[in-house]
Amino acid sequence: LAQVQFTLRQHASAIANLEELVRQGGTFPGTHDSLAEAYAWVGQPEKGLQVLQEYVRSRPDNVAGRLYLARFLASMDRAAEASAVLDGVAADDPGNGEMLAARFTLDVVAGRFGEALEQARLLERAAPPRDRWLGAVLPAVVSGYGGRLPEMMARFDQAATLAESDGL
């Protein structure tokens, strides 16, 4: 119900239902992420941040929760803190595709395109087909930021071919 309310932008109702789910012991990291996002939508991003920080504090080994926290910090223009969280994930799970993609995003936003492309290369060498595809498509973003639209389109075409060959 809360996810439907969130989708319909009924954020106050979603907050009430998500808070109740958390009170009842809900441990799914996506629940806490949705609650944090709902708080951000109603103008209370610090409360949303608190939700995710508490979740991560109580479940420090939950990689998904830490990735949600890093993404939320980045959305609050707190890139240094987001990067520190990602450093912790990298120490525990260096090949984590979600972490590499999050690092890519932080690097692009900071204008560190060489570093961003390195994250994409690591993804391209990953085993899961979705990560390989993401590693192929992300350089198109860098090309787009650089105004190289024909290169961007060629990279998207390469990624589409890879997706097709991997059965995605």
Image: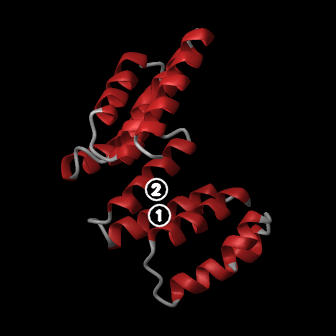
* Residue on which disc 2 sits: 68
| Residue 98 versus residue 23 in the image, above or below | above
Kind of residue indicated by mark 2 = Tyr
Residue 100, quarter of the rendered image: top left
Element on which disc 1 rests: helix
Say whether residue 126 is left or right of residue 6. left
Alpha carbon distance from label 2 to label 1: 7 Å
Q: Residue furthest bottom?
A: 24
Q: Where is residue 19 drawn, in percent x and y?
A: 60, 80
Residue at x 47%, y 63% (from the top left corner): 52
Residue at x 52%, y 59% (from the top left corner): 49
Pointer 2 with pointer 1, Cβ within 8 A: yes
Mark 1 surroundings: few (<14), some (14-19) or many (≥20) residues within 10 A: many
| Residue 66 versus residue 122 in the image, above or below | below
Nearer to me, 86 or 3: 3
Kind of residue indicated by mark 1 = Leu
Colouring of the image: secondary structure
Nearer to me, 129 or 18: 129
* Residue on which disc 1 sits: 52
Q: Where is residue 14 drawn, in percent x and y?
A: 70, 74
